[in-house]
């Protein structure tokens, strides 16, 4: 890779590679610099249509029914559904994807420990994901993961591969640099310092654009990252079989970059 600043590439299982990795892993949210843009995981259009179909008829009944008891029951049912919708929306809105000067800070907490420095993000391993609520259906995944940063009602997301700051256990595993694959990417068994993150958004391409602009401004060769993310976008399936759209990235894998091989 060429450019003013270099990506973190680990040449092999040696002390120098491990020192570079640990230096990056020790960075926190303050090391990411000032926030350039913030995105939240709002539900998509389909969710709002379904919510209206479920809630509005009960509201209409609460007004139209002639008997007071019927109106009370309809209003109670409608309010129950409305509360459920509000909870689903609230979970997504609480998720914040902060694009900073030197990396991403993701998670609900203001002082989130989940940081992804630009030097660890591969501009070639990015893609827009449709039907992202089916991530748990992929082989080897669990239904939830600290790397799934989207709400329960999110339908699209930006997937990108970078430092796994959600699980610190890999730092103490012998041989973490030379392993060739990840073990159950959605589980707590981790044998690579890199992982796929999924950032929910109604407009994931806007997150990609903000990431690209920030990386380029910070000196990394990430031009056309957004175009690549859109071009290799994928739609998840209810029954994916053995299809793996997010292949694991080992510690010694090279950075693909925007001109590298496409994702499967």
Image (cartoon, grey):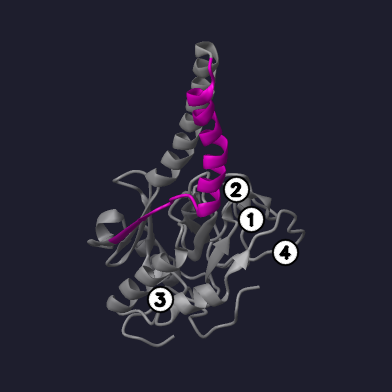
Residue 7 circle label: 3
**Structural distance between the alpha carbons of marks 3 and 1:** 24 Å
* Foreground tag (2 vs 4): 4
- Residue 178, x across and y down, in percent: 57, 68
Quick one: 152 or 50, which is closer to the camera?
Answer: 50
Residue found at x 63% / y 63%:
235
Classify residue 242 by image quadrant.
Answer: bottom right
**Structural distance between the alpha carbons of marks 2 and 3:** 26 Å
- Residue 260, x across and y down, in percent: 55, 83
Q: Earlier in the sequence, mark 2 or mark 3?
A: 3
Residue found at x 50% / y 46%:
48
Name the residue beneath numbered marker 1.
Answer: 183
Quick one: 247 or 79, which is closer to the camera?
Answer: 79
From the viewer's perspective, is residue 139 above or below residue 152?
Answer: below
Span highlighted in magenta in the image: 37-66
**Structural distance between the alpha carbons of marks 2 and 1:** 8 Å
Mark 2 touching mark 1, by CB under 8 A? yes
Of all residues shown, which one is farthest toward the bottom? 2
Question: For numbered disc 4, what is the local secondary structure?
Answer: loop
């Amino acid at each position: 890779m060429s450019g003013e600043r270099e990506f973190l590439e680990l040449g092999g299982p040696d002390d120098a590679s491990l020192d570079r990795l640990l230096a990056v892993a020790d960075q926190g949210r303050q090391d990411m610099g000032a926030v350039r843009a913030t995105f939240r995981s709002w539900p998509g259009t389909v969710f709002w249509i379904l919510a209206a179909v479920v809630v509005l008829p009960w509201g209409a009944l609460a007004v139209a029914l002639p008997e007071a008891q019927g109106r009370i029951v309809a209003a109670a049912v409608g309010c129950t559904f409305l509360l459920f919708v509000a909870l689903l929306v609230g979970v997504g809105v609480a998720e914040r994807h902060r694009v900073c000067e030197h990396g991403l800070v993701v998670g609900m907490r203001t002082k989130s420990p989940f940081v992804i420095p630009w030097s660890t993000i591969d501009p070639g391993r990015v893609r827009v994901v449709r039907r992202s609520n089916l991530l748990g259906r992929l082989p080897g995944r669990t239904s939830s993961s600290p790397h799934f940063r989207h709400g329960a009602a999110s339908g699209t997301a930006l997937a990108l591969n970078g430092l796994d700051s959600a699980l610190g256990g890999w730092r103490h595993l012998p041989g973490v640099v030379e392993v060739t694959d990840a073990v159950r990417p959605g589980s707590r068994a981790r044998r690579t310092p890199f992982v796929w993150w999924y950032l929910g958004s109604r407009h994931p391409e806007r997150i990609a654009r903000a990431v690209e602009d920030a990386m380029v401004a910070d000196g990394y060769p990430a031009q056309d990252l957004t175009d690549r993310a859109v071009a290799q976008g994928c739609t998840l399936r209810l029954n994916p079989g053995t299809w793996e759209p997010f292949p694991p990235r080992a510690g010694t894998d090279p950075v693909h970059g925007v001109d590298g091989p496409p994702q499967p």
